[in-house]
Structure formats: structure tokens, C-alpha cells
Image (spheres, helix red, strand yellow):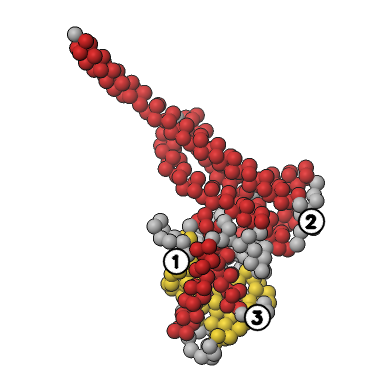
Amino acid sequence: MALIDISTIIQLAYFGSFIVLMFYGQRIQISMMLVGVKRNLGKLERLRKAAHDSVLSSALRFKGDQKAVESRIDRLTGSFAIQPVSMDPSGIVGKLEHILDTYDDNLRTEVKAIATSATEAEVNTLSNQMEISIGLDQMYRVVRHFYLLARKQGGILALYQLQMAMPQIMEEAEAYSSAIDAFAKGNPIGDGVGPLIASKMAEGAQPREIEQDTIMYETGFDGRNLLLVRAKGPGGSVGKPGVAVEKLIEQNSPSLVVTVDAALKFEGEPSGEVAEGVGAAIGGPGVDRYHIEQSASKRHIPMIAIVVKMSNKEAISAMTQQVRLAVDEAIKRVKNTILSASKAGDTVIVAGIGNTMGIP
């Protein structure tokens, strides 16, 4: 009799749970998904606040009024840049470049107003910290928007999309968060591998500024004339390498253009792996790459790309030992490329692309 009672109870429980899931399954699923997103939202808020506090702390080192500095930083944190209209693609690169230059100039002007006694390098570094804070703030606002929308309207499709994107958003947010300390301390970051390689190849040559925040070294290598381009350090800057290379191509008619940059690795690939290819190895919105491709293709100059692979987190946080060890191998690859793709008497441009944080 006891066995029959237990069997009956199990059957009733089974049918009861089936009915509950049939009528309330979606609501239960939405509730569980909302809890998971809310947990990540809380973490994003903590990362955002930590970045804001780090920027504020760095800015207050220059003895500004705390209330005025905090007010400016809060206003800057909500700043944005609107992409140019793309219905008529003709001339869109020039429009995008103008908007990006204006945004950078405005950000630097505001940072200079916050830290009036800061040097040019310190302004660049503080601007980089501000950009990280802006990025984390925007991530938080987007996730919060879709979270509140899903909770308000019960929109399971929007919630599904958000949940699918959350791992990638959180990975990028954690990368940004780890970068804030490196920028605050002025340590070289993984993305600085390109400028570091250019500096090491300069062999004591004196630099001269050829474009805004962009310098060039002129030296020799095995009968070739080397023009080494990189952003100006040690403050955090990427310079304008595209415009600089374009100018050098017009003035010197080189036989080869080599670009060296950090590149995102695939999962399973080791950090610090050096790879070679063709084209212009330069990230960002594409403006600098456009300048290099346009000028090189017009004159049929070969473009060789050499990259050091790393994760997104490694690219914007303190340079790891694996990346440092890859520098010598990358230099060796650059030299081999120059020897095999040019001849004695040729002029070769080598552009070390990346952020010069902590690299003088």
C-alpha cells in the first residue's frame, strides 16, 4: 500500500510540475535570466565606479578643486561621438577622421582644464584613463537599458540577445578595468609592442616630430635607409601614423612599407606568437589604414604586416612577459623581411603601431 501511495505522489508531482512549467515556464526562465543579468550589471557598476575613482584620483594629483574636477569628469564621462552619415559613402573617411580629431581635441582640452599643471605626456595619459572610464560607463548604460526594458516589458527576445552578449561584454569590461591601473601607473601596455619594436630598431637615432604626436627616426640597415615611425611617448598616445606614413611615402618614394602591431589571438593560440602577412597592420576605425593603403597602392609599394598576437585584455593592460619576449623575434622578422623584399640603396618605412604608454 505504501508503494502505491509513493508512486501516486510521484505521478502527481510530475504532472503538477508539467502543468506549472507549461503555464509559467517562460516566466520562470525570464526571472532566472534577469537574476543573472542583474548580477553582471552590479559588477559592471562596480567596475565603472572604480574607473571613475581612479581618474578622479589621478586628476587630483595636479591640485585642482575637487568639486570642480569631479563635475568636469562626470560631464566628460557621458560624452560621445556621432558617426558621420554613410548613405553617400564618397568622402566618408575624411568626415570620420574630422569627427575623431575633433573628439580627441575636445577631450584633451577638457583634461588640460582639469589638470592645468600637467605636462603633455601626463595629459595624454589622463585622456587615456578618461576614455577607459567613458567606455565602461557606456557598457553599463547599455546593459542597464536592456535589463530594465526586459524587466518592464517582459521582452524575452531582447533578454535572450542581452544574455548571449553578456560574456563578451563582461570580458571587455574586465579588460578595460585591468587597463586602468596600468595607465594610472604609466606602465607599458601590450598594445605598445609596435612602438617598442620601432624604438629598439632606431639604435640611438634622434627622433623628430613629423605629425601630431608622431615621431620618426632615420637610420640605416644593411645598405638600406630606414624610416621608423611611431607615436610620441611616454604618455599614452597612438599618434597619427597613417598620415605620417602617407607623408613619408610622398617625400621619399620607398620600395617597401612594413607595419608592426599587436593583433588579437584566437582562443587556443599562445600569447606572444609572431605572424606575418600582407597589408597594413593597424587597428582602430580604419582612418589610418586608409591613408597607408591609399598612398602605397597608388605607387604600387608592397605592404608587409608583422603582428604579435595577444588577448584583448593583454593588449590594454600591463605588458606581459610573453609579449616582451616576442619583441626580439618580431625585430628579427622585420629585418628578414627588409632583406628579402628590398635591395641596397632602397628606402624602407617601418611603422610601429600602438599606444606609447610608458615607452619614451
| Residue annotated with mark 1 | 273
Judge the density around disc 2: few (<14), some (14-19), many (≥20) Cα neighbours within 10 Å: some
Residue at left offset 52%, top offset 54%:
313
Q: Are marks 3 and 1 in contact (CB under 8 Å)?
A: no
Disc 2 residue type (three-letter):
Thr
Above-or-below relation of 290 to 227: above
Three-letter code for the amino acid on which mark 1 is drawn: Glu
> Rounded to the nearest whole Å, what is the CA distance between mark 3 and mark 1?
28 Å
Instruction: Give the percent coordinates (x, y) of residue 69.
Output: 75, 47
Q: Nearer the viewer, residue 199 or 129?
A: 199
Q: Is residue 69 left or right of residue 285?
A: right
Label 3 and label 2: CA atoms lie apart by: 33 Å
Hey, what amino acid is under mark 3? Answer: Ala
Q: Nearer the viewer, mark 3 or mark 2?
A: 3
Residue 78 drawn at (x, y percent): 64, 45
Badge nearest the viewer, 1 or 2: 1
Mark 3 and 2 residues: CB-CB less than 8 Å, in contact? Answer: no
Q: Earlier in the sequence, mark 3 or mark 1?
A: 3
Numbered circle sitting on residue 205: 3
Residue 24 pos. (x, y %): 36, 23
Label 1 crowd bin: few (<14), some (14–19), many (20+), radius 10 Å? some
> Residue 128: percent from the left, percent from the top?
64, 56
